Image: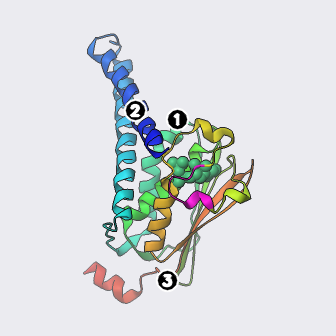
Amino acid sequence: DFVANVSHELRTPLASMLVFSEMLKLGRVTDPDKVREYGRNIESIGLKLTQTINQILDYSRIESGQKRYHFEPTELPVIVEEALAACAGRLQQQQQTVQVLWPEEPLPLVMADAEAMTMALINLLDNASKYSAAASTITIRLQCEHNSVTLAISDEGIGIARAEQAKIFEKFYRVSTGMVHDVKGSGLGLAIAQHIVAAHQGQLTVTSELGRGSTFTIHWPGVVVDDESKAKAEL
Ligand code: ADP
């Protein structure tokens, strides 16, 4: 299943890339706007492919115990903005809107491996988009209390049956009913996200209702950087 899924994830975008580049090579499109559009398509497919390949490599590093994390004082908005930028193409294509609900008080610095946490958030955002209808809204809500941060990603999508909710975090597991048939994936996104969150001493949980949507929440305790470490980080 994994090989079939992954081959599809790589072959389908490569095939479209080849079609676009063939059209450009043969001079079939000459209108400058069209040429630019094809260029943009090739670029966004390339970015998506890079993301898929990174995910597979990341997972194999995790599996073999070679994944290393580098924790440093990090600004939460940077993680959120970078994840949003990485998913922008897909969200735009699906005409989906993301609303970010920031807390009223300013966000503290947190101890994180920014690159890894961004990857976890990308996986959750990507799923929120994949398993929802076009033009739906995805909400990211950040809360910070005492020393803990919660980051919740909610969608208005197909939802996940109660019996499946624990299984979806297992590697390669994909719910096999309903619309999921039409949505390709490697079944690794949540396993990777969960591993990254656990490496940050956090927890990744899901609440979901079939047909109504899902919320994936990162509970991240004890991550707020105190004034002393903040001062050191600024030196
Ligand atoms: P992939 O999306 O590549 O299949 P994941 O590990 O990210 O792999 O997710 C595992 C499964 O969990 C998905 O195949 C899908 O069935 C289900 N799933 C994950 N996120 C959502 C979501 N936001 N809404 C509905 N189903 C979801």
The magenta span reads 167-174
Residue displayed at 31% across by 69% down: 68
Mark-to-mark CA distance, 2 and 3: 43 Å
Give the label, 2 or 3, closer to the camera: 2
Amino acid under disc 2: Arg
Residue 16 percent coordinates (x, y): 40, 26
Residue displayed at 38% across by 66% down: 114
Type of secondary structure dominating the magenta stretch: loop
Residue nearest the viewer, comparing 131 with 64: 64
Q: SS of the residue at dot 3? A: loop
Neighbourhood count class around disc 3 (C-alpha, 10 Å): few under 14, some 14–19, many 20 upward: some
Mark 2 = which residue?
11
Mark-to-mark CA distance, 3 and 1: 37 Å
Q: Which mark is residue 61?
A: none
Side of 61 where 160 appears, left or right: right
Q: Are marks 3 and 1 in contact (CB under 8 Å)?
A: no
Amino acid under disc 1: Gln
Give the label, 1 or 2, closer to the camera: 2
Q: SS of the residue at dot 1? A: helix
Amino acid under disc 3: Gly
Answer with the quarter of the image where residue 32 lies.
top left
The C terminus - image quarter:
bottom left
Mark 1 = which residue?
93
Residue at mark 1: C-beta within 8 A of ligand 1:
no
Residue at mark 3: C-beta within 8 A of ligand 1:
no
The number of numbered discs placed on residues in the rendered structure image is 3
Residue 14 percent coordinates (x, y): 36, 30
Residue nearest the viewer, comparing 171 with 204: 171
